[in-house]
Image (cartoon, rainbow, N blue to C red):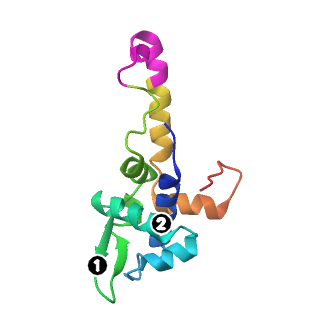
Amino acid sequence: MKITSKGRYGIKIMIDLVKYYNSNTLVKSREISERQNIPIKYLEQIINNLRKCGLVISIRGAEGGYKLSKPPETITLYDILKCLEGNLSIIDPKSDIVQGDAGLFWKEIDNKIKDMLSINLVDFMNKMENNDDSLMYYI
């Protein structure tokens, strides 16, 4: 599993949209691009994928823009990364490594990664803002 710039930028985009969720404000891609320092064309490709996965809603027109499709407490980093990166498993399903007792070890690691990524956007933002002595997250 490798998280590319698409995945990292996707998380930045979604966090940007969280900040406007309660105000029901539509956010323009140009605004997100400027705030998050993401090239506009790349941002539009990413946000289109997020829309196709049902994580973002787009409204056309002069007053249009983007917003989260559901409450940020229900969207996880796993949802975002799976949408943008595809299979997040560290295990190649065709590999014989998943056979036998050793396979249990690799499956456990895979499950722990999924558990870590199952943090919702609000909790993730709180962890970043609180910056206590727990895990550090960088995007």
Residue under the image location 41 percent in, 26 percent down: 92
Q: Which residue is mark 2?
A: 13
Q: Position of residue 84 (x, y in %)?
A: 40, 51
Q: Residues within 10 Å of mark 1 (few under 14, many from 20)?
A: few
Residue segment shown in magenta: 93-106
Q: Position of residue 116 (x, y in %)?
A: 51, 43
Secondary structure character of the magenta stretch overall:
helix
Q: Residues within 10 Å of mark 2 (few under 14, many from 20)?
A: many
Q: Which residue is mark 1?
A: 59
Marks 2 and 1, the one that precedes in the sequence? 2
Q: Residue furthest bottom?
A: 62
Q: Position of residue 135 (x, y in %)?
A: 64, 48
Q: Position of residue 45 (x, y in %)?
A: 39, 62
Q: In the rendered structure, does residue 105 fall within the stretch colored magenta? A: yes
Residue type, numbered disc 2: Ile
Determine contact: label 2, label 1, CB under 8 Å. no
- Image check: 64 left or right of 133? left
